[in-house]
Image (cartoon, grey):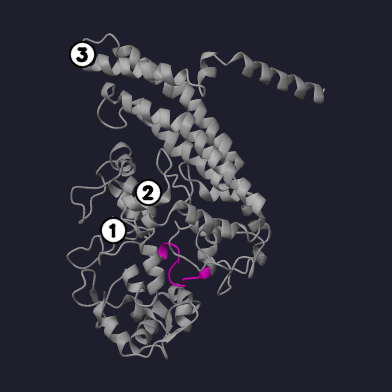
Amino acid sequence: MKTSIRSLIAGICLIPIAVHAYTLPELSDKSRSCVECHKETNRSIYEQWGESDHFRANVGCYECHAAAETDVDAFEHNGEFISVIVSPKDCARCHIKEVEEFSHSHHAKAGRILGSLDNILAEVVEGNNGLVTEGFPHGVSAAAVNGCWQCHGSQVKVLKDGSLDPATWPNTGIGRINPDGSEGSCAACHSRHEFSARTARMPDNCGKCHMGPDHPQKEIYEESKHGVAFRANIDEMALDSEKWIVGEDYDAAPTCATCHMSATKDQPVSHDIGLRISWNNRPAISVRPEVSDAKMGLPGKDIPWTVRRANMKNVCLNCHESNFVEGFYVQYDGLIDLYHEKFAIPGKALYEAAQPLLRKPKFSNNIDFVWFEIWHHEGRRARHGASMMGPDYTHWHGTYEIARNFYTEFIPELEELAEKYLHSDNPEKKAAAEKLDQMLHDTLNDDNHRWFLNKMPAEEKAKRDAARTEFQSRYK
């Protein structure tokens, strides 16, 4: 914590205000000095601050940016020690509850993906070490710096002179690893320096990261009836309301914030965005959120998915009746089950069985890309599409593309691989090929896939033929 500001606040009477923060009786002399200069040199920043609740609470530049001389990212500026980065640890001096909730969320831990398979793609497969800075004398991939790190967050490096390494700053990635050891960036959602609640409640705010081929929540929302209703009724959304309770302050449409974190008549605002999610659809095979929380050592490990689902239903019931809500979850769970049973579970097992027959570097085989896109792109799109009632993303961008690539690329690649090594002189390769060949046989003869071998049961074929005839006669 920046000790200079701690001592400053300790000597001032703090008055609680409605937004769970504090107000000061007047703007401090140190902040006033900052303002006198920055209103000339950084007029837009000054104006943004002037529109903020911070301005009205007499919380100025110094209260947020003050640093102790011993802070790793501190530098002297006009006789005061300050830091550029305002971390969650700094925000927690006033916003204690919000930062604690945020620190327990997956958002705050997003920077931990930096060593995962995703980042190997950006660093090795897509990238090189061509971006050389003082903090990275041996180079770093510009694909990672400009891509992964800008959403997930970089590990901000402080140089010897106290400046921030340009490969790691600027960065507002939501899981940014800050010089003071804290994780996360409040500014990822509450854009500096206005910190507007209205902006944070807008769906576009989440679209910086939650879009694209692997997690297109923003596009799915826009396709859904929720997104259509929001655009048609944005003037009725009361986005500037202090409490912003769904069903009370507004009922025209929900936004991302409405469903995942904002207040209802029964629930307070929460900055832990996982407390209303009943499936974690990030992995190849979806898991319950308490499982992923336990893996990351988060307190949510003790909150079962049934409680989280009840929390989300509480949001839904402000606009929908119970039959609608219960029916939605039957449909959603059904899609998860379909994806798991037909594609994810057998696909993962087949891919793992193929490993002894593949080149060792990840993504040096075509099938590495095929399987990765089946679960990471298409599988996620299908699951997220169903979770947010986006039919086009569930089907055409989801299950259709999963099926097409499963049957026309994934299975043929595996068949060719097994055939290549079935008669190998290497006993380990031969055994692996025999195992893979048997697994392919068993998978394709399963009820889910035997249509592919033209083995659809006669009774099922007759049933489908009868339905087709009835349909045709109805509309002839």
The quadrant of the image that shows the N terminus is bottom left
Cβ–Cβ under 8 Å for marks 1 and 2: no
Disc 1 versus disc 2: nearer the observer: 2
**Residue type at tag 1:** Pro
Q: Residues within 10 Å of mark 2 (few under 14, many from 20)?
A: some
Name the main secondary structure of what is drawn in magenta.
Answer: loop
Q: Secondary structure at mark 2?
A: helix
Q: Is residue 336 above or below residue 222?
A: above
Q: Is residue 436 left or right of residue 194?
A: left
67 or 96, which is in the foreground?
96
Disc 3 versus disc 2: nearer the observer: 2
Whichever of labels 1 and 2 marks the residue nearer the N terminus, that label is: 1
Magenta stretch: give its range.
187-197
- CA distance separating discs 3 and 1: 51 Å
Task: Please count the marks in the image.
Answer: 3
Say which quarter of the image contains residue 253.
bottom right
Give the percent coordinates (x, y) of residue 446. 48, 21
Assess whether residue 192 is covered by the magenta stretch. yes
Q: Secondary structure at mark 3?
A: loop
Q: Is residue 137 above or below residue 7?
A: above
- CA distance separating discs 1 and 2: 37 Å
Whichever of labels 3 and 1 marks the residue nearer the N terminus, that label is: 1
Assess whether residue 160 is covered by the magenta stretch. no
Q: Is residue 64 above or below residue 324?
A: below
Residue at the disc numbered 1: 166
Residue at the disc numbered 3: 426
Label number found at residue 291: 2
Whichever of labels 3 and 2 marks the residue nearer the N terminus, that label is: 2
Q: Residues within 10 Å of mark 3 (few under 14, many from 20)?
A: few
Residue at x 31% of width, y 90% of height: 11
